[in-house]
Image (cartoon, grey):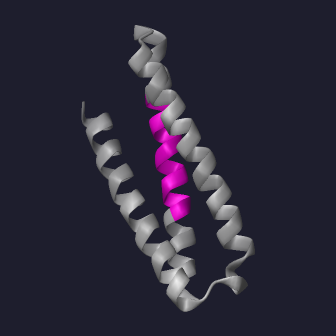
C-alpha cells in the first residue's frame, strides 16, 4: 500500500532528523547546562522513541491497515515531518 510506504519513509526521515536534533541539543546542554536545554533533550528523546515505535508498528502491521486509515496515518506523519524539518532548519541555522 503506497500510503503506508510513504508513512514509513517519513518515519525514517523523522528518526534521522531527531537524532541530529538530539546531537545538537546535547552539545548545547554540555556547554550551557540550562533547564531549557535538558527539556529539549527530553522532548527529542521521547519523540524519537515514539517514532521508532510507530515505525515498528507500521512496518510489521501494514497488512491490517485499511486505505482510509493509512491515509490518516500518512497525513499525521507528514505534519510531524514538516514540523521537524522547520525545527531542524531553525536549530542548525542558529
Give the quarter of the image for residue 4. bottom right
Give x and y (percent) for residue 46: 57, 40
Q: Is residue 5 magenta?
A: no
Work out whether 79 lies above or below 63: above
Our reading of the magenta stretch's main secondary structure is: helix
Q: Is residue 20 left or right of residue 91?
A: right
In the image as oriented, which residue stretches furthest toward the right? 60
Residue 65 in sight from this viewpoint? yes
Q: Tell me residue 13's x, y (percent).
A: 49, 59
Residue at 60% from the left image edge and 89% from the top image edge: 66
Q: Within the image, what quadrant is residue 76 found in?
A: bottom left
What is the number of callouts on the image?
Answer: 0
Residue at 49 percent of width and 65 percent of height: 10
Q: Is residue 3 above or below residue 87?
A: below
**Magenta stretch encompasses residue 13:** yes
20 and 53: which one is in front?
53
Residue 84 shown left or right of residue 66 in the figure: left
Q: Nearer the viewer, residue 11 or 80?
A: 80
Q: Position of residue 9 (x, y in %)?
A: 53, 69
Q: Residue at x 49, y 35 (%)?
A: 43
Q: Is residue 87 above or below residue 64?
A: above
* Quadrant position of the C terminus in the picture: top left
Vertical position of residue 48 compared to residue 24: above or below? below
Magenta segment boundaries in residue numbering: 11-24
Q: Is residue 28 visible?
A: no
Q: Quadrant of the N terminus?
A: bottom right
The percent position of residue 88, horizontal first and vertical second, equals 35, 43
Figure quadrant of residue 69 = bottom right
Task: Decide if residue 17 is on the left or right side of residue 61.
Answer: left
Amino acid at each position: 500500500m503506497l500510503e503506508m510506504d510513504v508513512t514509513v519513509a517519513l518515519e525514517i526521515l523523522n528518526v534521522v532528523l531527531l537524532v541530529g536534533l538530539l546531537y545538537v541539543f546535547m552539545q548545547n546542554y554540555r556547554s550551557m547546562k540550562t533547564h531549557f536545554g535538558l527539556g529539549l533533550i527530553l522532548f527529542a528523546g521521547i519523540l524519537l522513541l515514539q517514532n521508532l515505535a510507530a515505525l515498528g508498528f507500521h512496518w510489521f502491521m501494514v497488512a491490517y491497515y485499511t486505505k482510509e486509515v493509512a491515509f490518516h496515518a500518512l497525513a499525521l506523519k507528514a505534519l510531524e515531518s514538516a514540523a521537524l524539518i522547520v525545527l531542524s532548519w531553525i536549530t542548525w541555522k542558529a
